[in-house]
Image (spheres, rainbow, N blue to C red):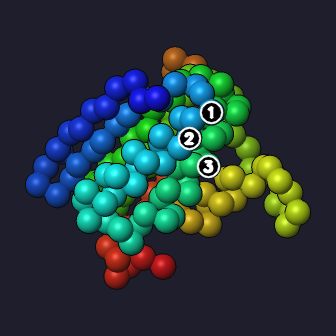
Amino acid sequence: MTMAVNTMALNASDWSHEAAFESTPLSAGHARRFVVGHLVEHRLSHLVDAVRIVASELATNALVHAQTPFIVTLAAVDGNLLLTVRDGSPGLPTRGPNHNMDTSGRGLGIVDSLSLDWGIHEAAAGSKAVWASFTLSAQQAV
C-alpha cells in the first residue's frame, strides 16, 4: 500500500512524483501502477513498457533483498526520465552472470538492457538508491 505521495513541478518542462511503499509483496505491483499512471499522465506512453519492467525489478530487489519500506521517484529532468528506488538497506545490489535458464538474479541485467544508464547512490545514513534513466523523446528512444 502507498504510504505517501508527493508531486512537484520543478520548472516548465521538469516534474517529479514520489511515493513511499511498505515492505509487502503487493508493493511491487503498486509501484508499477504508480509509474505507469504518471507516464500516461505526462503523455509518455512510449516509455511505459520499459519503465514498468525496470520499476518492477528495482522494487522487487528492495522487497527481497533490503526487506525495508522503499520510495519510488519518477522525474523528468533535462530531457531525461529518471526512475529511482530508495530503500533502507546499505547492502548494494550486484549483477551476476546471466544464464538463459536462471529463475532469479537477472534483474540488473534487465535494467541495464532497458535503460539508457543506471547506477547506485550510497547514502550516508546506511541506505541506498538505485536509479535508471531513459530518454524522454520518442524519436531518440531505441
Horizontal arrangement in the rendering, residue 8 relative to residue 87 (left or right): left
Q: Is mark 3 on a helix, strand or loop?
A: helix
In this view, the mark in front (2 or 3): 2
Q: How far apart are marks 1 and 2 (CA)?
A: 7 Å
Q: Residue 137 carries which label?
A: none
Of the residues shown, which amino acid type is indicated by label 1?
Pro
Q: How far apart are marks 1 and 3 (CA)?
A: 13 Å
> Label 3: which residue?
57
Of the residues shown, which amino acid type is indicated by label 2?
Ala
| Residue 32 to residue 1: above or below | below
Where does the image place residue 138, in percent across and percent down from the top left? 35, 77
Callout 2 environment at 10 Å: few (<14), some (14 to 19), or many (20+)?
A: many
Count of numbered labels shown in the rendering: 3
- Which residue is at 60% across, 57% downward? 111
Q: Which residue lies furthest to the top in this view?
A: 125
* Any part of residue 118 in sight: no
> Label 2: which residue?
28
Callout 3 environment at 10 Å: few (<14), some (14 to 19), or many (20+)?
A: many
| Residue 60 to residue 23: above or below | below
| Residue 113 to residue 60: above or below | below
> Label 1: which residue?
25
Where does the image place residue 133, in percent across and percent down from the top left? 45, 57
Q: Is mark 1 on a helix, strand or loop?
A: loop
- Which residue is at 56% across, 57% downward? 53
- Which residue is at 63% across, 41% downward? 60
Q: Which residue lies furthest to the left in this view?
A: 12
Of the residues shown, which amino acid type is indicated by label 3?
Glu
Label 2 near label 1: C-beta < 8 Å? yes
* Any part of residue 137 in sight: yes
